[in-house]
Amino acid sequence: MTKSVKDTDNWVTMSVCPHTGLATYTRPEWTDVIFGMDYSLSLTIIGDRILFVKIKGHSTLDVVANSTEFTKKIIAECFSPKKELFYIGDFSGITGITKSAKKYYIDYLSNLSQLNSFILCSSSPFMMLAGNLSKRFNIIKFSLRVEKDYSTAVRQAAFMANQVTCSPDDHVPHIDAPQDSSATAPPDHWGLGRLIHKIVSFPRTRRALPVRLTRVTRKEWRQDFENCSIQFELINGNIIHKVSKGYLSVDLVRPIYALQDDIIRSCGLSGQPYYLVNGVKDLQESSLKARKKYSRLFSEWLDEHPDLREVVVYGANRLLRAALSIAMYSKPCSIVFASDFEEAMAIVQDSKEHTPLRRSRCFMGKKRRKDTVKRYADELNCFLGNINWEVEGASELVEEKSDDHPFKNVYDAIALIKADIDELFRDREMAQVALRESEEVSRALLNATRDLSLLVQADGTIISVNQPFATALGQTTEALKGKQLANFLRQQTVDHALSHIKEVVETAEPYLFETNLDGRHYQNTIYPVFNADKKVDRLALYSRDITGLKQAQEQIHGLTQQLIKAQENERRRIARDLHDNVAQDLASLIISNDSLFDDFEEIPLKVRQRNSTFSGVLKKTIASIRDLVYDLRPPGLTQIGLVKTMDQYCIDFSKKYDIEIDLYTAGTERLNLDTDTKINLFRILQEALNNANNHAGATLISVRLIASHPDLILRIEDNGCGFDPDVRMVTALKEKRMGLKSMEERVNLLEGELTIRSQKGSGTRIVVKFPYNQKL
């Protein structure tokens, strides 16, 4: 018999433990300390080295963190740091525990420096099995014992602490060393109970509803999808009734839960207890992916809604019952299955009246005799052995176990697993058919072109090639399948191709590049090939031999350069003839005309005026010829240099057309360019300024000539109306205008780059960049 004495000064309740004879101590503030909605903690000190902690409710990370901090303070206050601590944890009242909370509690025990041993006390076969498995696989780093009840646990702790005070003749039972706890470990088949923890899977007795049902719904609480519909209503202010009909596909799962959350918020149920009744009688079927996603989101949704008291599902088949049962594992609320709506509402009313729920018989009842356990184990083994996993469906799965069978939920779970495996095989077979069809289509596309084409994986493994590609490598199409590109091409070429393949996989955009292989030029294009998930899993490579095209382009380029050089030579000849012959003859004619009437004083005034007008026309003609000669061959290029010639040209152009031109040069003082380079740069400037004046209507032009080793950069920018460069190139060819094309060819002569950026209404920028160190 336990004797209790209350110390009113310190409010300490002292008694004697009937199992060990040790003194026990507790306080009111240590008893039923609440840390969460349904989580509480009670502590008792036994002797001077044993701490007994009893936990009730659902364990989450927050409540476990707070309760362990509370326990740490009591340990620091009441136990000597020099003595070892024996910790008894009674988990029989735990209704569930999250993964993060379990890890936190194990870390907390591991960091207790005084802890000698932790003794787990629980009547739950699942908790005992979890503790024994943790010891077996070294999941925990501290000493752990597992006992099924308090009396065995406290005797074990007292024996380990060597604090037994009773004698064999005392009325307190004599304490021998406890037997190995493994002898009391539950049979292996109890491990299956983890699938049905806290599941009420038996039918309830239907009774008449004691209250009138007030049902409210709204138009937006109904959602019609393709092949599926969802309808919600609110009953009696705190019951959410959901009815699902049709085929549930994977893409509908998340919108359904989103609608459910909106309805709960709109009904103001957050922060107060409520119930969920789900009718699935008219839910025809669902895919494996949909069931998995529905179960996962259902489990997450339960964690986010702690105010939910109970889930009642009516009309569910055995597969859906098993899936929801697994999702409810270790959740604070229970799930009950009913046959129809009336029974479901009766169950909710029972819960509201705090009628205790009977638990699944897998967790209840007295200890079965050994032969009974063996009979159920043999039955389960026979059931598993008779299932043909290679054939879709199974006659063994048709028969349902009775509701009072202890492993009913286990059989239902196995049926669910078999159905999921069958669906996986169906999906796999369909995927294989789709793959074969895709390969046939890919092969047809590869063979539809004369280009070298192949289909590869991201790592360069060849999936399929066309005949021209195989012929180019001297192989057959079948011999190339499954081989690496590196087996047939130079490593440098393969590395180059793989780098582009990686870029296509990352960007999911085609990529165009050129290669040179054994003197042949190839234009290559890599196209991404997408799978059902819209991800790039293969790539199509097309390679076209453009050697002839390149040779033709080189010939055209060479002819264009010769044409430009011939044009400059002709300009030079015409400029010299105009200057040396025509201009000189006109100058002599002016002199002769001006002295024509010197010896004839009686020439009428009108005749003299006409002669003077004629002389003026001749002078203007000479000036025009000189401008033409300047444009054809600026003499300053060889006399005063490129920069000064450009400066003078910009000044003259600005005066002539009333356009502001800003010229700036940098790093050009020591430039020693050859005559052809000077002429080409000057012609580019001429063309750009004339285009800005004739076509853009510019009022301001900026010219920059900058030498930045190893490049020389000429940039011309105006504030004109702008144009589309691509369109302009096409129309210029049709209109036989060669201004931009001539500019491009002159840049090619300089072995440089030409960039034209323009947009309608935003002006034009022309940038010429070429390596000037080769021209010194």
Image (cartoon, grey):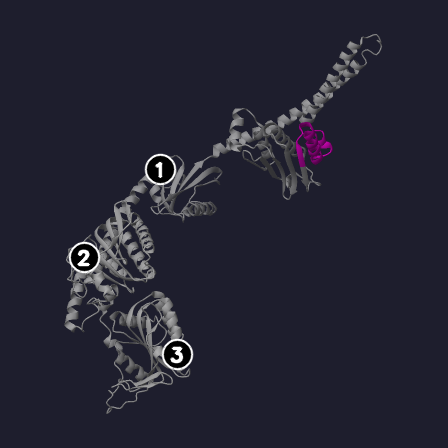
Q: Quadrant of the N terminus?
A: bottom left
Let me know if residue 639 is in the magenta part: yes
Q: Quadrant of the C terminus?
A: top right
Q: In this view, does 714 lie to the left or right of 220?
A: right
Q: Is residue 133 left or right of residue 580?
A: left
At label 1, counting other C-alpha atoms closer than 10 Å, the crowd grade (few under 14, some 14-19, many 20 or more) is: some
* Residue that numbered label 1 is attached to: 445
Residue 277 picture location, percent across and down: 24, 57
Q: In this view, does 601 lie to the left or right of 10?
A: right
Q: Quadrant of residue 737?
A: top right
At label 3, counting other C-alpha atoms closer than 10 Å, the crowd grade (few under 14, some 14-19, many 20 or more) is: some
Residue 112 visible? The answer is no
Q: Give the range drawn in magenta.
A: 634-662
Residue drawn at 81 percent across, 14 percent down: 595
Q: Residue 342: which numbered mark, if any?
A: 2
Name the front one of labels 2 and 1: 2
Q: Quick check: marks 2 and 1 in contact, CB under 8 Å?
A: no
Query: Residues under labels 1 and 3: Cα distance?
Result: 76 Å
Q: Name the residue type under label 2.
A: Glu
